[in-house]
Image (cartoon, grey):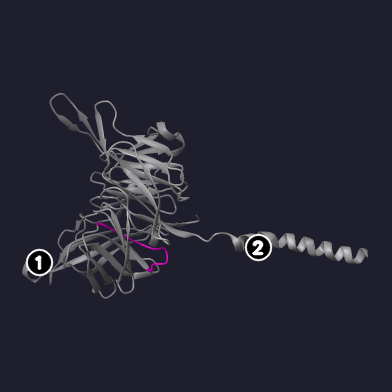
Amino acid sequence: MRKHLHRYSRLGVAALAMLPLLLAGCATAPRDYMAIANRPNQVSLIDLEDRKVLRTCPLPGRFGAGTLQMSPDKRTAYVLTNQFENIYGVDLDTCEITFSAIQSEGNTRIKTTAAFAVSQDGTELYVHQNPSLLLRDRYEVQEPRLAVYRIADGLKAKPVRTYSAPRQVIVMQTGNDGTLYLGGSDIYAMDAATGKYTLKLASRSRQEPRYSQRDVLSIWPLGQQSGEFIRMYTAQRFADETRKPETAELMWGYERIDLATGEATTGDFGPLDVVLFSGMTRPHHPNEMFGALSQLQKFDIAKQQLVKSVDLGHSYYCVNFSSDGSKVYLAGTYNDIAIYDADTLEKLGNIQLPGGDQSLATAQVFPRTP
């Protein structure tokens, strides 16, 4: 009898040892979600698997610009609003405002175009600030700066560190090692602990005999789905060093920082036939570049060729992808999200947002457990 009891007790111990594995197997798998801001001044959490708006959270103040960055745990959305001045952190599960950075104070007005980012550990917020003194008879432009906020300071956050920063910085992103990348006339790498920065990738200052000066439009911090900080440029590519405009090709190109390794790459990816506002490489397909505005276009980077183009029902400013790279999501302008198949560019549907237009808002797509 004791032998049998001993055997059953051993079976019980084995079953208990297997319990964590069994529970892990029953755990809910991550799903893709999107966070997006729109008018009058609100941010929505969308379940992209069900194509359903789960909840819409009001934000203080007035709308603008709707630039959005997610916390590392994908629970809090940090949104630039109130006409490019304030940044709020909102818990997307409860709609509670958990963080507030009111930048303007006294007679100092501070604007941030779209340049802010969250540290990799979620403890700090980095903001590129453009201050101006409002005097009785004039505005006096001040030097730009990088302000660092502590997330733990909550609704009364003030900068805990400030550093001198380059002018004309429009977008920012943090690398996996904590390096802060600032996208302005060139792309810079900054140590957020010391404020020291270096040139990471030359853009406007780039000297190429067979190319004109690059032109960059970049106001959407995109690329996390592909592990990149990326923006597009346009330039004339001349036939030779005589630089004759009549023989030049108009080209699209990309400037890319690998967020995991810090490697900087740049190059043409296709002909400039139509205007595009934003683009990024397709997740798990690094040779495919997608861009959108009035058309959705797909390029083969290695061949520098347009693969396919489809007309859109209306303009969309902001492009993003599902985590597996199978779907393209288009946002910005009106109050809908368009969904396309990344292989065929066939339209799969739309998601309607409550409220008004999204304007320049950034659509961030991310996986997380429900």
Closer to us: 369 or 275? 369
Say whether residue 29 is left or right of residue 258. right
Q: Is residue 191 magenta?
A: no
Q: Quadrant of residue 192?
A: top left
Q: Residue furthest right?
A: 1
User: x, y (%) of residue 341?
Assistant: 33, 70
Work out which quarter of the rendered image holds the N terminus and state it: bottom right
User: x, y (%) of residue 232?
Assistant: 25, 60
Mark closer to the observer (2, 1): 2
Closer to us: 72 or 322? 322
Q: Is residue 209 visible?
A: no
- The span picked out in magenta is 317-326
- Looking at the image, residue 360 lies above or below residue 268: above
User: x, y (%) of residue 287?
Assistant: 33, 71
Closer to us: 12 or 142? 12
**Residue found at x 31% / y 34%:** 103
The 10 Å Cα crowd at callout 2, few under 14, some 14 to 19, many 20 or more, is few
Q: Is residue 320 magenta?
A: yes
Secondary structure at numbered mark 1: loop
State whether the magenta stretch is mostly helix, strand or loop. Answer: loop
Secondary structure at numbered mark 2: helix
Q: Which numbered marker is on residue 180?
A: none
**Residue found at x 12% / y 25%:** 137
Q: Earlier in the sequence, mark 2 or mark 1?
A: 2
Q: Which numbered marker is on residue 22?
A: 2
Disc 1 designates what residue?
243
**Residue found at x 8% / y 68%:** 242
How many tags in the picture? 2
Closer to us: 88 or 39? 39
Structural distance between the alpha carbons of marks 2 and 1: 67 Å
